[in-house]
Image (tube, grey):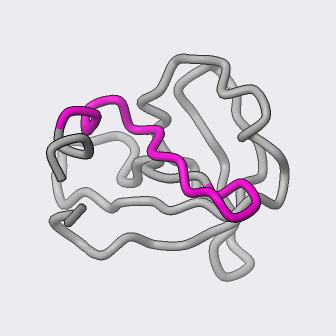
């Protein structure tokens, strides 16, 4: 699947308040929006590789969105807004 902007790799640190995740990118912690309200039990392991998209919208409070989590050799799309697009692709 193609995204508007290149995805940014990072490492998962933690999730809190259901919609926030902290991700480590280049020794810096970034807070990103988590669009999936499910538990995602088993995916949210500290150190798992994640992929973020960056928004150019100046009105957004959080500039980054969690898109993909890697667990082992599997990549899991966690942005529920793209479910149908992923299936069509």
* Relative horizontal placement of residue 49, taking residue 58 as reference (left or right): right
* Relative horizontal placement of residue 35, taking residue 26 as reference (left or right): left
The residue lying furthest to the bottom in this view is 26
Q: Residue at image x 76%, y 60%? A: 72
* Relative horizontal placement of residue 29, taking residue 38 as reference (left or right): right
| Camera-nearest residue between 76 and 47 | 76
Q: Residue at image x 69%, y 64%? A: 73
Q: Based on the picture, tell me whether residue 64 belongs to the magenta stretch.
A: no
From this view, report whether residue 1 is shown above or below residue 17.
below
Q: Quadrant of residue 56?
A: bottom left
Q: Quadrant of residue 41?
A: top right
The residue lying furthest to the right in this view is 46
Residue range corresponding to the magenta coloring: 70-84
From this view, report whether residue 50 is shown above or below residue 36.
below
Quarter containing the N terminus: bottom left
> In the image, residue 31 lies at what x, y percent?
57, 49
For the question of whether residue 15 can be seen, the reply is yes
> In the image, residue 50 lies at what x, y percent?
59, 60
> In the image, residue 84 lies at what x, y percent?
20, 33
| Camera-nearest residue between 28 and 37 | 37
> In the image, residue 70 lies at what x, y percent?
64, 58
* Relative horizontal placement of residue 81, taking residue 17 as reference (left or right): left
Q: Residue at image x 68%, y 72%? A: 28
Q: Based on the picture, tell me whether residue 77 belongs to the magenta stretch.
A: yes
| Camera-nearest residue between 17 and 10 | 10
């Amino acid at each position: 699947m193609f995204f508007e902007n290149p995805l940014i790799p990072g490492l998962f640190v933690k999730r809190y308040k259901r919609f926030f995740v902290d991700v480590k990118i280049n020794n810096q912690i970034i807070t990103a929006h988590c669009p999936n309200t499910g538990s995602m039990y088993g995916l949210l392991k500290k150190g798992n590789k994640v992929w973020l998209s960056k928004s150019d919208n100046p009105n957004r409070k959080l500039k980054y969105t969690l898109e993909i989590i890697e667990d082992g050799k599997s990549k899991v799309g966690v942005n529920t807004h793209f479910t149908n697009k992923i299936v069509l692709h």
